[in-house]
Amino acid sequence: AKCIHSSHDFSDMVFIDNYIFNKDVFIQFNSTVGEFVGYTKHGVCNAQQRNNNPGILQSERAEVERYCKH
């Protein structure tokens, strides 16, 4: 997980959570997009499952405030 920003007031903060297997990102959550994106066949399946779970999505969307801006 990482936080990216370019302004001093953190107004453009982005939270990115990568899931990596064998040095390849297979699924990623980006707070700008607001949902998981799969990059492999397995990652697409996992992204769909996570995007259909409102609890997981809500938790990931809140990370920009909890993890990055704190």
Image: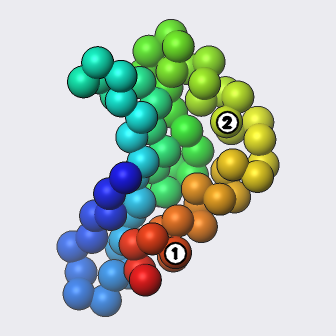
Q: Give coordinates of residue 20: x percent, y percent.
A: 36, 30
For marks 1 and 2, the one nearer the N-term is 2
The amino acid type of the residue labelled 2 equals: Arg
In what element is the residue under mark 1?
A: helix
Q: Quadrant of residue 50?
A: top right
Residue beneath the point at 40% across and 72% down: 68
Q: Residue at x 55, y 39 (%)?
A: 36
Q: Residues within 10 Å of mark 1 (few under 14, many from 20)?
A: few
Query: In the figure, is residue 57 to the left or right of 63?
Result: right
Q: x, y (%) of residue 17? A: 42, 48
Place of residue 47 in the rendered image (x, y in percent of width and height, measured from the top left): 59, 29
Q: Residue 15: x, y in percent? A: 41, 60
Residue identified by numbered label 1: 66
Q: Does residue 26 sit above or below 17 in this rendering?
A: above
Please name the residue that numbered disc 2 is placed on: 50
User: How far apart, in angstroms, are the residues tagged by discs 1 and 2?
Assistant: 20 Å
Mark 1 residue type: Arg
Q: Nearer the viewer, residue 48 or 22?
A: 22
Q: Is residue 26 left or right of residue 8?
A: right
The image shows residue 60, relative to residue 40, as above or below, that is below
Which image quadrant: the C terminus? bottom left
46 lies left or right of 31: right
